Image (spheres, rainbow, N blue to C red):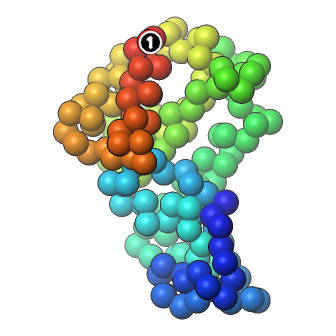
């Protein structure tokens, strides 16, 4: 969860300092793409009451919960085999690809796989194409200069 300094950190919505006794809600670092409109919430703390006042607040909470549920180490299941992913290094999650509910990528948010089975996933070519287009159109920028997207493309390509 976001690192929040009570008495120092400001709520990005109302710009007031988060004080002791305030009801505060934190968002994890669950968005890799700086260009996603929801990046505003990434790794940040807010007044609980301020979040729903933001136009994207409800969606941000919904996607945060989906992220936490899907990536919980106790519930990591491969979409292909339907079985738990045996080792951490075999776990692959698509993460938040887009917060745009109208985007064809939205259905691929937070999908979990055992890397050993990903080649058998029927929708793999479609997602691969959509991610390649995202890269070509310059709609993705992450803290690794696009490296997170590159890694995903490599994994889906079977590299
Ligand atoms: Zn606030």
Q: Secondary structure at mark 1?
A: loop
Q: Position of residue 47 (x, y in %)?
A: 61, 81
Identified at 60% across, 23% down, the residue is: 113
Q: Position of residue 98 (x, y in %)?
A: 39, 46
40 up-or-down from 63: above or below: below
Pointer 1 local density, CA inside 10 Å: few below 14, some 14–19, many at least 20: few
- The answer to whether 100 appears left or right of 21 in the picture is left
Identified at 57% across, 32% down, the residue is: 93
The image quadrant of residue 5 is: bottom right
- Could you tell me how many numbered marks the image carries? 1
Identified at 45% across, 11% down, the residue is: 158
61 or 11, nearer to the observer: 11
Quadrant in which the C terminus is drawn? top left
Q: Position of residue 121 (x, y in %)?
A: 50, 14
Quadrant in which the N terminus is drawn? bottom right
Residue at the far left: name it: 137
Circle 1 residue: 159
Q: Position of residue 136 (x, y in %)?
A: 21, 33
Residue 101 in sight in this render? no
The image quadrant of residue 134 is: top left
Residue 115 in sight in this render? yes
The image quadrant of residue 80 is: top right
9 up-or-down from 103: above or below: below
24 up-or-down from 40: above or below: below
25 up-or-down from 148: above or below: below
Identified at 54% across, 15% down, the residue is: 118
């Amino acid at each position: 969860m976001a690192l929040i300094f009570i008495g120092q950190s400001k709520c990005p919505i109302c710009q007031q300092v988060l004080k002791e006794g305030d009801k505060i809600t934190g968002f994890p670092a669950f968005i890799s793409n700086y260009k996603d409109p929801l990046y505003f919430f990434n790794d940040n703390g807010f007044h609980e009451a301020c979040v729903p006042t933001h136009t994207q607040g409800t969606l941000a909470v919904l996607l945060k919960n989906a992220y936490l549920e899907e990536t919980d180490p106790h519930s990591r299941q491969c979409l292909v085999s339907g079985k738990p992913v045996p080792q951490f290094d075999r776990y692959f999650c698509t993460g938040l690809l887009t917060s745009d509910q109208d985007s064809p990528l939205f259905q691929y948010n937070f999908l979990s796989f055992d890397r050993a089975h990903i080649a058998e996933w029927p929708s793999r070519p479609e997602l691969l194409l959509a991610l390649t287009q995202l890269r070509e159109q310059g709609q993705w920028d992450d803290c690794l200069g696009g490296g997170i997207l590159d890694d995903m493309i490599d994994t889906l390509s079977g590299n």
